[in-house]
Image (cartoon, rainbow, N blue to C red):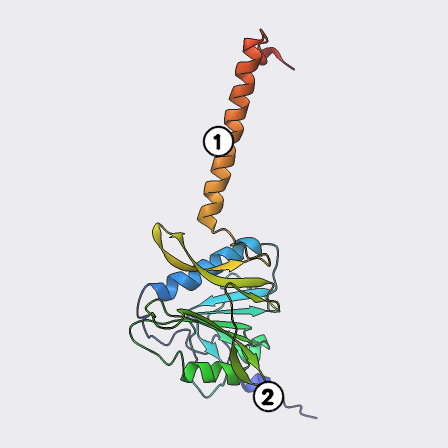
Amino acid sequence: MFKYNPLGCLPSSYDLPDSDDTPVDNELQDLIPGLLKAILAIVWANRWDWFFGVDMGVYYDPDKSAIVPDGFLSIGVERVFDEGLRLSYVLWEENCVPILAIEVVSHKRRGEYSSKKKFYAEMGVLYYVVYNPQRRRKAPLEVYRLVDEEYVLVSGEPVWLPEIGLGIGKERGTYQGITREWLYWYDEQGQRLLTPEERIVQAEQRSQQAEQRAQMLEERLRSLGVDPDLLP
């Protein structure tokens, strides 16, 4: 007897466009989620059950165009499929709705506070993060949590996201040589997680300190009449 498999009739990620061909409005829309992804790649280096997309199409309906968040995080999916990596994020292949979506607002509004907010809620995205660096009268960073199918603004900063096990907030710092306000991940105690660049600098400082201690010890031994080169 013939068995009908509806999933077999749906287009795959290889059949769908991997971009909407719409350029980002400014560089921050790539750099800000890119930094969050880079930090995760270090702190979750041994985990393979997550994926962070940057400016990647999310397909939720085979008959509709993809929505393209500036950044999104999914947990409970394969981090890497194969060497070709993901072309796009297709819900009927992943079977997992992103747990977090991020939108960075530019001078040109794209429905971040209206249509996109409503859409992510309907999709079931648990956390919706909106960052507007140009905002002055209201908070530039807003984090919403889905409650009874509607987004509720979460107070405080950084905002702890228990389902993710990290907090998110903003802070002034330097990334790729650019000093400005960035979004960062935080631990449960509110301590900011280091960026890849900061980890490199920290490792170099520790190496220099170790060399200095070794030099001081060598000089101390020589002052005592002991040749350190002759020690076993």
Residue density around tag 2, few if under 14, some if 14–19, many if 20 or more, within 10 Å? few
Q: What element carries label 1?
A: helix
Q: Which residue lies furthest to the front in this view?
A: 137
Residue at label 1? Answer: 208
**Residue under the image location 39 percent in, 74 percent down:** 19
Q: What element carries label 2?
A: helix
Residue at label 2? Answer: 6
Q: Quadrant of the N terminus?
A: bottom right
Q: Which residue lies furthest to the top in this view?
A: 225
Instruction: Decide if residue 54 is on the left or right side of residue 73.
Output: left
Point out the tag, 2 or 1, that comes first from the N-terminus.
2
Q: Please, what is the three-letter code of the amino acid marked with disc 1?
A: Gln
Q: What is the quadrant of residue 91 in the picture?
A: bottom right
Q: What is the quadrant of residue 135 in the picture?
A: bottom left
Task: Give 136 or 206, whichever is nearer the viewer.
Answer: 136
Q: Please, what is the three-letter code of the amino acid marked with disc 2?
A: Pro
Q: In which quarter of the image is the C terminus?
A: top right
**Residue under the image location 52 percent in, 15 percent down:** 219
